[in-house]
Amino acid sequence: AYWISDGRVRAWLDPACAKLGCRLPLRRDAATLRLLSRDIRAHPSVPGALIISATLRNDAAFAQPYPTVDITLSDLDEKRVAMRRFQPREYLSDTRAIGGGLTAGASTALVFEVADPGKDAVAFEFKFE
């Protein structure tokens, strides 16, 4: 539910929930997630595979869930060659970190292993949901 992440609604819900002892899901605002760095290279030990690494920072004033990450690889004409969507459990091994979310202002390293779509893939893009 989108409304549960709305700052105006949370300003009312958070104190009420604190008094009642309930627990709300983490707020989500993908627009406040920043990609600080990214890199793609051949996998050192798996033929036909790539390693994509990135650094993600949460610029929100609150902790939020780790995002679903869409990675798109494109050719010189910006046509999609490959696309893959990763859930947090696919790129984080620490389940406690997943449950606690990404703390406000914190950065984290992300590593993805993907099949190499071939020499036509010359650009890549990240999208966070």
Image: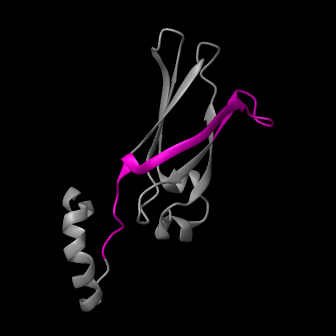
Residue 118 position within the rendered picture, expressed as x and y whole percent measured from the top left? 63, 17
Foreground residue among 11 and 90: 11
Which residue is nearer to you in this view: 104 or 85?
A: 104
* Image quadrant assignment for residue 50: top right
Residue 40 in percent (x, y) is at 67, 31
Q: How many marks?
A: 0
In which quadrant will I find the N terminus?
A: bottom left
Q: Residue at x 45, y 14 (%)?
A: 79
Nearer to me, 120 or 123: 123
Horizontal and vertical percent for residue 5?
27, 61
Q: Is residue 66 above or below residue 43?
A: below
53 sits to left or right of 82: right
Q: Which residues are magenta?
A: 24-53
- Dividing the picture into quadrants, the one containing residue 115 is top right
In the rendered view, tell whether residue 57 sits above or below residue 54. below
At 25% from the left and 63% from the top, the residue drawn is 7
Q: Residue at x 55, y 49 (%)?
A: 56
Asked if residue 29 lies in the magenta stretch, the reply is yes
